[in-house]
Image (tube, grey):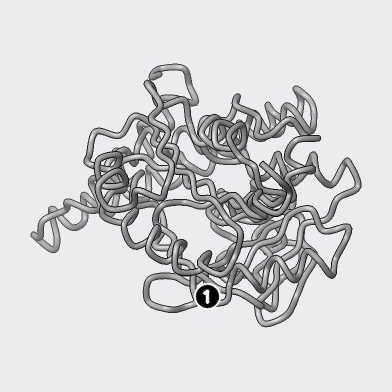
Amino acid sequence: MSDGDRPMLTVGIINFNAAEYLRACLRSVLSETKSLRAEVIVVDNDSSDSSAELVRREFPEVRIIEMETNRGYAAGCNRAFREAQGDLFLLLNPDVEVHPGCLRGLTAFLDSHPRAGIVGPTLLNTDGTVQASCGSFPTTAGYFFEATGLYRLFPTNRRIGGYHLGYLDYGKENRVDVLLGAFLLIRGEVYETLGGMDEGFFMYSEETDLCRRARDEGWESWYTPTGSATHHGGKSTEPRAISMFIENHRSKIRYMKIHGSTGTALAAKAILLFGVFIRAVAWSALTLVEALVRRRRTGRSARRAVLFWRTVAWHLGLSR
């Protein structure tokens, strides 16, 4: 393939049981890439729904790679990159809809910022509000403020809200530590140099780890409002809320062990356990109040209590 025929951009969509969102995602991507030299690859992580069939039937121009087992988001990203031919690599969740002009704006941003290795656009919630998509590299203090909910009370405080960058102005370009993995545009050379995603992260914190390793190699991560997309968020993980919440904790601890020490990993585990125990007690109390005083159904409260108690059990080694 000559350089003139080779795609400039590879879009890798990592899908798991998200067929109802994948259709809209692909339509938006294909509409956006009509004027770009681009290829689109869907890596399906052993979905049990009709995702792969949908791609083959409705989007024959899209390449579908069906994984025999679900090895996680990081492994899916790396599988897509091994097939990628573009100089730029876009990692996309299937519950994202790309808005007109977004990809051109982001590619132009990379052209004008030679040290930017990773860039992300404005992400909107389903209701159109701006989604928090940037953060700082984790610290044990950041985990504490998150686990105790203090960051919600003081989001603009630079110490308490710093982990989630609650004070960030999403109307301006900002160099940040971490971008949400739902939409990451990465230079291919950066992804290759870093060896891709760390597949030891099944899900969660893999983008944090990637941004950290990119920073350590001298590359910058940027947020820019020159493009936007809607991220419906968490739709493929809702049916597995408990296992995914536990996986989130496991990944946070693993990140601290890699980029900190055994001591900071143990501290992170203690902080996360403390925070989830508080929430388990609070939701259990609310469930009891609703049952005895309000005499109303306690479905949501009971589910939250079970979620947090199961996570406590995992931290204590009582549950896998």
Instruction: Locate residue 153 relative to residue 260 in the image: left or right.
Output: left
Q: How many marks?
A: 1
Residue at 75%, 22% (x, y): give it.
Answer: 262
Q: Position of residue 306 (x, y in %)?
A: 29, 38
Look at the picture and state if 8 lies above or below 319.
below
Q: Residue at x 59, y 49 (%)?
A: 10
How crowded is the residue under tag 1: few (<14 C-alpha within 10 Å), some, or many (20+)? some
In the displayed structure, 195 sits above or below 214; it is: above
Quarter of image, res 140: top right
Considering the image in quadrants, where does the C terminus appear? top left
> Residue 153: horizontal and vertical position, in percent?
57, 69
Asked whether 187 or 130 is in front, the reply is: 187
Q: Does any portion of residue 145 appear in the rendered image?
A: no
Instruction: Residue under label 1, please give it.
Output: 130
Q: Split into 4 quadrants, where in the image is the N terminus? A: top right
Residue at 39% across, 32% down: 45
